[in-house]
Amino acid sequence: MFLRRQRQLENESSISMIANEPSPYDPIKYTDAPDWQLTNCCSDEEIIFLSLMFGYLLANFFLWNTALLKPMKLIAVFVHEMSHATACWITGGKVLGIEVFGNEGGVTKYQGGVRGCIIPAGYLGCSFWGAVFVTLSGDRTAS
């Protein structure tokens, strides 16, 4: 495989030398100064997307520990704990209670069930529901 590719490169470079064209594998081509103008970088849609993503990350950074995002974080904790409970029910266990605390923690108390399925179910359930909401977002481009 390696020798075949090397021969192909040699043939391509010899053909381009005959035609007096620069080889696509010419090292001089890759040592040019970087294009800091980014002339071939982004379309308008990509610039809008990157700007909105940067704004979203900036808003999250400044609003993360405020009362504005607290309800959403508590809902995420509830979905996490409910996923544990669902896995418990599916594997034949009994859920004794679900508690969600104000410090964004929670616990699901259960008896029975398959512990190896119940423990990772919190993270898997949150990932599953996140994928469902993205898929149902209404627009193929948005999802």
Image: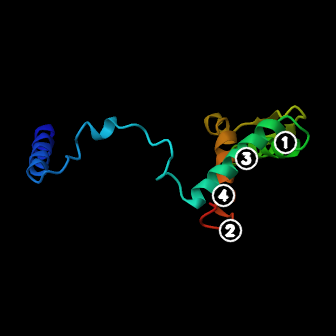
Q: Residue 118: where, in percent of width, then height?
A: 67, 38
* Residue 79 left/right relative to 117: right
Image quadrant where one finds the N terminus: top left
Q: Compute the Cα span from label 4 to label 3.
A: 19 Å
- Mark 2 or 3, nearer chain start: 3
Identity of the amino acid at label 2? Gly
Q: Residues within 10 Å of mark 1 (few under 14, many from 20)?
A: some
Q: Where does label 2 land, which residue?
A: 138
What amino acid type is highlighted by mark number 1? Leu
**What amino acid does circle 4 point to?**
Val
Kindly identify which residue carries mark 4. Answer: 134
Spatial CA distance of label 2 from label 3 is 22 Å
CB under 8 Å between discs 4 and 1: no
- Of tags 2 and 1, the one toward the viewer is 2
In three-dimensional space, the C-alpha distance between marks 4 and 1, rounded to whole angstroms, equals: 20 Å
Comes first in the chain, label 4 or label 3: 3
Residue 116 occupies quadrant: top right
Query: Where is residue 127 shown, x and y percent of the image?
Result: 65, 47
Q: CA distance from mark 1 to mark 3?
A: 23 Å
* Image depth: mark 2 or mark 3 in front: 3
Residue 48 is at least partly visible in this image: yes
Residue at image position (32%, 38%) is 30
> Mark 2 packing: few (<14 Cα in 10 Å), some, or many (20+)?
few
Query: Image quadrant of residue 135?
Result: bottom right
Tag 3: residue type? Gly
The residue at which mark 3 appears reads as: 55
Kindly identify which residue carries mark 1: 74
